[in-house]
Image: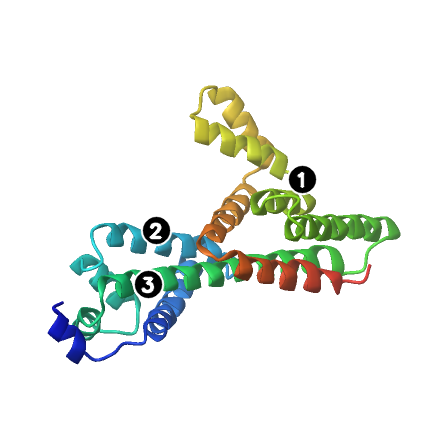
Amino acid sequence: MSMSEEVFAPKVDVEKLAHDLFLGIKPKLQVTIHLSTHSKDVYYAAARDVIKNITDYARRGVDSDDLIQYLANEGLYVYDALKRVWSNLSEEQKKEVIDLLISEIAEYGLTNLFASIVGEFWSRWVSVSHSEEYRKMAKEKRDRILKAAKDYLNGKISFFDMAVEIAKALWPETEYFIELMKEEKEGIKDPFKYFKLRNQVGKAVEPFLRNYFTGVELASYISDNKLRKLVRKYLINDMSKFIL
């Protein structure tokens, strides 16, 4: 865009554009998740996929027709309208829109991840009447989650380590799943060990843990300040409300 074009080009509210694009993506994201998993508790898994698509298209250039077409298809804009708006942005503004959009998608996904943790704890350990021994176990799990969240906020552990501690508190199979992820990351050298670990995790739990740790990855797209607010709201304030 030339200097004269910049002077006379209509001004675009970058934050509003990013938010409008997010609002368009949000319902389609929910439908995609519902059809593919039959669960509303894994918004965070599909959020990562949408972010990957946006990032892949953006690597071809912020003026890539493929990027504009994807954002138009997923958002509230028709292609021609978005292309006109996009042409009025500088390269830095386009990058800012993409960064803001990705951050908002990630925050939405991670919010649902934290909400699902609270919901899982409520449905499994709080909502029904159990024996004194069961309530004692529930209290231990709640306190373990609270400790992990507080240790993260106090800088004692990383966000990922906090997520692992929470998963271990809720699902004992997590220990095997962590080993399973390590095997996959390093390359499966021992197929027997790999399939043994998968059996120890279990077919019912493995898909949920994969979605859970996919959701944990969204933290890398969110500012530390927003991340800490989410942890405090859901993993401290909401979990503290459970009287056991």
**Residue bearing mark 1:** 172
Q: Nearer the viewer, mark 3 or mark 1?
A: 3
- Which quadrant would the N terminus be assigned to in this image? bottom left
Q: Which residue is mark 2?
A: 52
Disc 3 element: helix
Q: Is residue 38 in sight in this rendering?
A: no
Residue type, label 1: Pro
Q: Secondary structure at mark 1?
A: loop
Identified by mark 3, the residue type is Glu
Q: CA distance from mark 2 to mark 1?
A: 30 Å
Look at the picture and state if 70 lies above or below 79: above
Q: CA distance from mark 3 to mark 2?
A: 17 Å
Disc count in the image?
Answer: 3
Q: Which of 178 and 149 lies nearest the eye of the viewer?
A: 149
Marks 2/1 in contact by CB < 8 Å: the verdict is no
> Which residue, given by chain and number where applicable, does mark 3 sit on?
96
The amino acid beneath tag 2 is Lys
- First in sequence, mark 3 or 2: give its number: 2
Residue 38 spot, x, y in % from top left? 47, 58
- Residue 83 seen anywhere in this rendered image of the structure: yes
Question: 103 left or right of 238?
Answer: left
Q: Residues under labels 3 and 1: Cα distance?
A: 41 Å
Q: Which mark is residue 219?
A: none
Q: Residue at x 32, y 76 (%)?
A: 13
Q: 37 above or below 191?
A: below
Where is residue 46 shown, x and y percent of the image? 42, 55
Which circle, 2 or 1, is nearer the viewer? 2
Badge 2: residue crowd in 10 Å (few <14, some 14–19, many ≥20): few
Q: Quadrant of residue 23?
A: bottom left
